[in-house]
Image (cartoon, coloured by chain):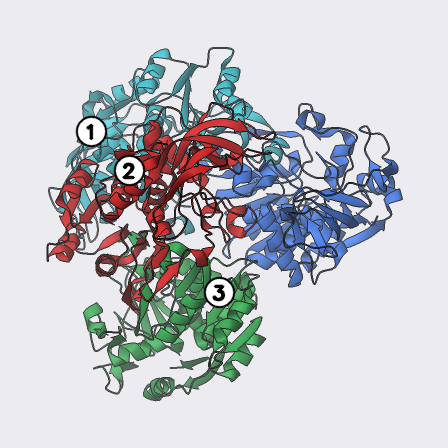
Chain colours: A red, B green, C blue, D cyan
Amino acid sequence: MMKAARIVEPQKPLEISEVETPHPQDVQVLVKVKTVGVCHSDLHLWEGGYDTGDGFMKVTDRGVKFPVIPGHEIVGTVTEVGKAVQGIGVGDNVLVYPWIGCGVCSACRIGNDNLCDTPRSLGLFQNGGYAEYVLVPHFKFLAKVVGIDLDAAASLACSGLTAYTAIKKSNANSQHNMVIFGAGGLGLMGVQIARALTNANIICVDIDDAKLAIAKEMGADHTINSKDPETIQKILGLCNNKGADCVIDFVNAPPTVRMGLAIIRKRGTLVLVGLFGGSIDLSLVTIPLKSITIQGAYTGNYNDMLELLGLARRGVINPFISKRYKLSEANNALEDLKSRKIVGRAVINP
Amino acid sequence: MMKAARIVEPQKPLEISEVETPHPQDVQVLVKVKTVGVCHSDLHLWEGGYDTGDGFMKVTDRGVKFPVIPGHEIVGTVTEVGKAVQGIGVGDNVLVYPWIGCGVCSACRIGNDNLCDTPRSLGLFQNGGYAEYVLVPHFKFLAKVVGIDLDAAASLACSGLTAYTAIKKSNANSQHNMVIFGAGGLGLMGVQIARALTNANIICVDIDDAKLAIAKEMGADHTINSKDPETIQKILGLCNNKGADCVIDFVNAPPTVRMGLAIIRKRGTLVLVGLFGGSIDLSLVTIPLKSITIQGAYTGNYNDMLELLGLARRGVINPFISKRYKLSEANNALEDLKSRKIVGRAVINP
Amino acid sequence: MMKAARIVEPQKPLEISEVETPHPQDVQVLVKVKTVGVCHSDLHLWEGGYDTGDGFMKVTDRGVKFPVIPGHEIVGTVTEVGKAVQGIGVGDNVLVYPWIGCGVCSACRIGNDNLCDTPRSLGLFQNGGYAEYVLVPHFKFLAKVVGIDLDAAASLACSGLTAYTAIKKSNANSQHNMVIFGAGGLGLMGVQIARALTNANIICVDIDDAKLAIAKEMGADHTINSKDPETIQKILGLCNNKGADCVIDFVNAPPTVRMGLAIIRKRGTLVLVGLFGGSIDLSLVTIPLKSITIQGAYTGNYNDMLELLGLARRGVINPFISKRYKLSEANNALEDLKSRKIVGRAVINP
Amino acid sequence: MMKAARIVEPQKPLEISEVETPHPQDVQVLVKVKTVGVCHSDLHLWEGGYDTGDGFMKVTDRGVKFPVIPGHEIVGTVTEVGKAVQGIGVGDNVLVYPWIGCGVCSACRIGNDNLCDTPRSLGLFQNGGYAEYVLVPHFKFLAKVVGIDLDAAASLACSGLTAYTAIKKSNANSQHNMVIFGAGGLGLMGVQIARALTNANIICVDIDDAKLAIAKEMGADHTINSKDPETIQKILGLCNNKGADCVIDFVNAPPTVRMGLAIIRKRGTLVLVGLFGGSIDLSLVTIPLKSITIQGAYTGNYNDMLELLGLARRGVINPFISKRYKLSEANNALEDLKSRKIVGRAVINP
């Protein structure tokens, strides 16, 4: 038996109780959880869905079945392996790739399990890491963690990965002006990754001066508090008055997307990442006339996660853990995140 | 002196008169116009702008200066060349690439003059082909026309090129379900090109059964009249109930884009091409959750135009000319296009 | 029990005998073989290895274990499925993707099982299709065959796939001059595919006028018999005297590769496909000065195979079966292939 | 009049004399040279050609005409501009992109002037920077230099650019083992760039321990002196005994290329950069069986040069100048380079 925190019903407190400890068969691996990140997606799961602008998209309509153990940013130690497991052994510290797919659809076939038609993600569609142990369905979803702080590594499986994919989709290069909306956990990770991978002129926009100060420290060339009514003009001024080559919107709420469309230049790319919700009025003729691209980014694939681990090992990115909880405090952790008390990333150490 | 039809003021009849015949210097080339296509963009120029959904975008605000000779789908014969011209000689039949750029901005440097920051397109920002002669600023914007009907070649510079780029941006492959909105000049060209370049399951949607019949002939696997209230369900049924992998919207009006978003599958690409105008209410959270891409397509580059000429020479695509006008009938040509009397493509033979 | 033809030892006649019929578990599928192609790779397997120019590379050193049932171009009917099989049912006609990999290495993770570090290909590293039945390890390696002749479909799993990948690697476009060496089974498939997918000027070179005549029929723009001492000058003449943009060498023997290097233009790509063997003297300084690329092509991935099935279904390519054998004639089939008696493709119908 | 050092005849001392100062017309720009790099290519030009393994390739057969002023790594200050020059003004410090092309061939059209069919490179096909002034044919070949040491910037136009392109062609990522042959000027720049752009495991190989020590400082994870008879085994041991994913050979001489082929893994890429010369015996069958790629790299394009300037400005790369000469010492500079007395980069300050 093991201790676990389960969502039994949306919007009800998580139930913390003893459940059966799974045992790995064949290619499966059992991991003792050391750290599990507390992510906004856990909140969406707990709330039961997303605001679509004109309604509510239930997670149960997307295939979630309650009760479920949440938690998809998992670092731990291998304690038991199935008979067909190769290259991973008991005692290895591992980061778990949670965005598991069917293995057969056209996305999975090229390694993009995160975009699977019928996803089986850990902590969402099957039990995750808010528990003492987690069963990983195949050893290929594990990456060894060596030379990095284990708590810091956890966030690379989701928020880090999402930021990384979003920056990659922006195709930014050295001549480019890049605007990043949001200096929260995702946005700050985005700034660090953009600084590490590109020579772009990075402009970070948020409504919180304290967060913007951290963004500057982490490599943003310019920061703007969007409470300033001149924000658009200021951004344009920093972009040779032509507009931004790419905008990465880690908020993805109506005000940020509207601003993004106002400042994007011809041929520019607007990457939408956040799951804040709402809708905007989109003018159609400008899309072809300016030849712009609007692209959604959703987590990333296993290879991207390995890349990120490489960046972290070289010290180029430093995920920032601000608060730690016990497993018995899982409800507090989610409440704190909901009421915006968390700066950077919080983790649970079961 | 030469005869030319000029737009002197938006929404006023074109003035047909004698103007100075230009003479080519240095790398410039003078082309005697044999055929010039009558394009929807000519109408937008004549009307003075575009409907943006919440206003009117004036072409003069985009850099157009009246009076100007319209006409950007130009085929003709070289009659005089500047001293530095190479590889092109008097008597050559040529298709003119009209989407000329500054040559220095980041788009031009990689050959995408059509996406130039400060475009100098023929028939828009400088004099075009509604005239007996047109001055082409550099011999590199010409492509020899051999083995193709000259009238048919004209449309490859704009409508063909736009359709080609749009199909390419859709990244369609053999396993894909492709939906094409619009079976007008652009859409039919799109169907032909998609048939020639991909194995996709092509579904063409329009409100005109006659046009849909032609689409089927030209290679569409399925056609649907969108007056049918079951259109969305029918499309989904033809797409394994997962949705279309790509939608190419040659109309780009609110009803088609809304339908496009309703039928696009996870990871799908929606390419917006038409300049119809208007706006839609866009739900933000679905963009990252479905990881979709919305992309504008605007004409294409010189290399794409060469590719198209190759396809036409092999007989794989057959631009379809339905009506011919004299230069003196330029106003009639535009009026007929405006009142939707043209099926396929009309041309002027000066 | 089922009848099978096994290679028991290199260079000894295949043993045709009764062996245990396998039974599918879990995700496995049992296929009753209708057609299995007779391929040059079967010959290499039978001979025990390859000529490397300065020695002999044994297949056993690459992981092959005798006895083994050869045969990797397999079309058949599903007769039994494991419990976890989805989307494939008893009675389905299928083409088998034989280039199965480990599923975990960096090639397999992005769907390139054909380039796996530790390949498990059917008919090579595990039993193949020279038998009444073949056990396919996972249903994801099957593609349904509908609307194509079953015998013709078989070759799409290897020779067709190899030709397809090679043409794709050449990056040919409409302005390009493409030289194809070899008008055998692979080369003729290459000509058809190149004709279907590109506007390139296709020049096919072989030593056999009869085969060149077929190449011309299948879409080659020019053919040259390389017994002609002026071959190089002729090719250059057909390539604007600048050289070929791409050369696809389906022979890959010293004379063809030497000629390929002599006719390749600056920035050109030389794709080596055949396994004929031998070696050449390569001048090093010309590689960077001409900025050329030499690339090996080895079969292809599952998605490429689906693409090919699409091309075949549309009638764009027509694999050409010239001879049929019974399973009991397996030795004759290989002998005939070895002594160059086969034009196009031979198959065995067990 | 201005002072210049000209190659009047191969293998004769450069003539240092007064020549006419050019005056810029139209889009041309006159630059007062502050720094010009002394490059191995200058030596090849001076010697009149390259060793091809089986002969000598004369530069005059490639289009060079003597006398010519060498020098293609040019940094200077704009002193006069033609009437059509935009965005560049008198007094600007600039790095000159020297790999100028015809502007019309298929390479130039997509911005790869460095791969032009009929190159017009400065310091090779037209007068370069071993002079007080250099005439640049178009303002688009200039990049402003701000925030970088001017002497250090010079090498970015050639050795830095070549190293950058080579590293990019290797497609290295974080899971990759990268072997760099040569720790001279190019190789050390390659190590720095690889360290900045990838997470690869970098193994640098040379015959000089002092240079290898610098390579380690600049970011190589491992260094090996290839005098060690166990070099191949050691490299394989550092590459999981599978071989290197990519080899970048900045020497490109028979021993290094042979070793490169011995250590390259399946699917690996071998990038050949150096112009050392000679030839090797290449086994043909291994190219397709291992699916490897051999690719030449030759300088780079203007956008790559901008990227590099961005990296230098951020301090990520630091070109290393070891020796400075006056223009009157041009012959000494070349002699010193020839006799291997230069570590890193030498420059002339006219």
Mark 1 and mark 2: span between their CA atoms? 48 Å
Mark 2 and mark 3: span between their CA atoms? 59 Å
Helix, strand, or loop for circle 3? helix
Q: Nearer the viewer, residue B243 or B152?
A: B243
Helix, strand, or loop for circle 1? helix
Mark 1 and mark 3: span between their CA atoms? 48 Å
Tell me where residue B61 appears, x and y as whole percent. Answer: 19, 70
> On screen, A9 above or below B249?
above
Residue D213 in the figure: left or right of residue D348: right
Q: Mark 3, chain letter?
A: B
Q: Mark 1, chain letter?
A: D
Query: Are the residues tagged 1 and 3 within 8 Å (C-beta)?
Result: no
Look at the image and tell me whether residue C50 can be seen: yes
- Give the residue pinned by disc 3: B309
Look at the image and tell me whether residue D66 can be seen: no
- Give the residue pinned by disc 1: D151
| Kind of residue indicated by mark 2 | Ala
| Kind of residue indicated by mark 3 | Leu
Classed neighbour count for the residue bearing mark 1: other residues with Cα under 10 Å, few (<14), some (14–19), many (≥20): many
Q: Nearer the viewer, residue C117 or D156?
A: C117
- Give the residue pinned by disc 2: A346
